[in-house]
Image (tube, coloured by chain):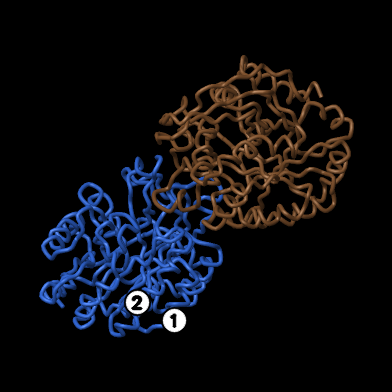
Chain colours: A blue, B brown
Amino acid sequence: MDLTLISPLDMHLHLREAEMLRLVAPLSAKQFAGGVIMPNLISPVNSLQKLKQYQNEISTACAGECFEPYMTLFFQPYTRSELEAAKEHIIGIKLYPAGITTQSDNGVTDFSAIEATLEIMQELGIPLLVHGETDDFVMDREQAFLPVYQTIAENFPNLHVIMEHITTAAAIRFLEKFTNVSATITLHHLMLTLDDVVGGMMQPDLFCKPIAKTPSDREALREAVFSGNEKIMFGSDSAPHPQHKKECLGCAAGIFSSPVALPLLAQIFEEENRLDLLQSFVSDNARQRYGITPPVKQVTLSDNAWQIPATFGNVSPFYAGKKLRWSVSSVTGQNPQSHLKSD
Amino acid sequence: MDLTLISPLDMHLHLREAEMLRLVAPLSAKQFAGGVIMPNLISPVNSLQKLKQYQNEISTACAGECFEPYMTLFFQPYTRSELEAAKEHIIGIKLYPAGITTQSDNGVTDFSAIEATLEIMQELGIPLLVHGETDDFVMDREQAFLPVYQTIAENFPNLHVIMEHITTAAAIRFLEKFTNVSATITLHHLMLTLDDVVGGMMQPDLFCKPIAKTPSDREALREAVFSGNEKIMFGSDSAPHPQHKKECLGCAAGIFSSPVALPLLAQIFEEENRLDLLQSFVSDNARQRYGITPPVKQVTLSDNAWQIPATFGNVSPFYAGKKLRWSVSSVTGQNPQSHLKSD
């Protein structure tokens, strides 16, 4: 059996830099038509100059692949002229509360001081992508952040707000309250609970932020995705770390899932008898919500069993060594003209 | 300032076997007058013969130290004659639900099938020590086990039941319901929440079973201990693993705290202005609840700052590398005649 996806998109993707970027970016570019590139580099992507430089690095690493890197700026107070200049080069601006995840030290500390920038973003039609966690108890952080979402969504009704990598039933319920709010969900949060992370042996390769939650939270995510909620887009939050940063005391947060995402998504959608919804989850919902037209690319999966490698370079992937029912059998697509620049 | 503890006891201790035992047993024996030795070895301690062999191994490793190894059998159905023969050699029998923690595969699967053994234990005055967790969601496992405690405590009102290493406010509340129920609490559960384990970087050295819980759970434990609850005894649950079983994918559960326990306990009791309660927590409550008379040993702590080593042998200890305000400055004690055998 074959399953062809048209222009699959990864709406939340960490490509890192330098050697790691050259390892992982081509793996995403092979199977996806585009990805929303997170800006939390060691030196955050907070200027148009840095953004163009980073975009070039990505394009060079992905040369020959049909893949659109949808760039984002790191949220900070920006002037109108900065935002006007950036607009055609970005898909949105990513907001991190300060200190909440990998390389977020320069994030927002005072949410009352961001309104001027949000006002201009709303006016210019620039979406706001948010890592929505507080510094409360680890299992409560997402729910505790919902009032911030509420304030932003109410005060900026024409600002497109994307709740990134949501993990809780509370976030699913919240999503219904505002037409201007969308969400991404990762592959791993559809599959894992905290039990998988620390319920048996401790599993550094399943450790991520936000942490996987309770069985009922996972059930709420699955129910939303497998019922075809059109406000929810796939975003892998694929976040590679070299093995020595995982297998150690003080292990880094992040699950590297991009090279296994499509086959594994096919498997879990098939298990729910909802393969019919995969196309909208991995592409159509994002086109609709963001109003984007990704490069045309056909990715065909076949039910030829595939064993996930133990490592890609020095990175252990999600589901390492496990056998999947589906594998990517063929990809056709044209090198894109940059969608964002040609708008 | 000096602080002298009389015959401190560790009422829940894993000494392992062979090389590891020879590394860790002397570290406990130096600072404690006795310890309750857990029986979950690779081949469980489930016969008097194995128990005597294990006790000899411990005594050899601790030669010259004033330390009483209070031995336990691994719970399984035992006959009256087995229990009568074992009685004078054990302080109790340790029950593990099957598969719930390290080397518990041979544990109890059917709680209705254990009553005959409990009946004889009650009659002979043999305490029951319990790892009280189910296989529910990891944060709920202890609370979900409370009905089992309830049934046992009600049906065997003269059986001394010890809830080992409790971690939740619910367990603290439960403890008040039955006069025949006691509890142990670890050092680390007085200090940690899940935030410390997976709230920042992931910390394999703070990973244990039961997992550290919420801030309000920790608060309930601290309130009980720092108010001098006499049903609660110190049990370190010190559980060493070599570094290669901690810093890896699939890391083992267990915190190695015995060599740092007394100085660190002094520190946290002092921070609460309750140094006056330390003697009862680390010794008197256990003597009272178990009716034991440990060997006489004086352990004096002084406020000479001490930096915990990064490792003891190939094991990373709790609070590795951190500086403590207290250190053990002198120990006096006589080699014990075995208390249990001379009863």
Q: Could you confirm whether marks 1 and 2 are on the same chain?
A: yes
Residue at 78% of width from left, 26% of height from top?
A: B89
Residue at 62% of width from left, 31% of height from top?
A: B8
* Crowd band around label 2 with a 10 angstrom C-alpha radius: few (<14), some (14–19), many (20+): many
Count the marks: 2
Residue B276 locus on image (x, y percent)? 59, 40
In the rendered image, the vertical position of residue A302 relative to residue A307, given as above or below: below
Kindly report which numbered mark, 1 or 2, lies closer to the viewer in this rendering.
1
Which callout, 1 or 2, points at the residue further toward the start of the chain? 1
Residue at 35% of width from left, 56% of height from top?
A: A259
Tag 2: amino acid: Asp
Between A299 and A194, the residue placed more toward the observer is A194
Q: Secondary structure at mark 2?
A: helix
Q: Which residue is mark 2?
A: A284
Q: Secondary structure at mark 1?
A: loop
Residue B134 locus on image (x, y percent)? 66, 52
Between B270 and B201, the residue placed more toward the observer is B270
Tag 1: amino acid: Glu
Marks 1 and 2 sit apart, C-alpha to C-alpha, by 19 Å
Quarter of the picture holding the C terminus of chain B: top right
Residue B162 locus on image (x, y percent)? 72, 43
In the rendered image, the vertical position of residue B67 relative to residue B77, given as above or below: above
Marks 1 & 2, CB-CB < 8 Å contact: no
Query: The numbered mark 2 sits on a residue in which chain?
Result: A
Between A279 and B24, the residue placed more toward the observer is B24
Residue B165 locus on image (x, y percent)? 63, 44
B188 lies left or right of B131: left
Query: The numbered mark 1 sits on a residue in which chain?
Result: A
Q: Which residue is mark 1?
A: A176
Residue A68 visible, this orientation? no
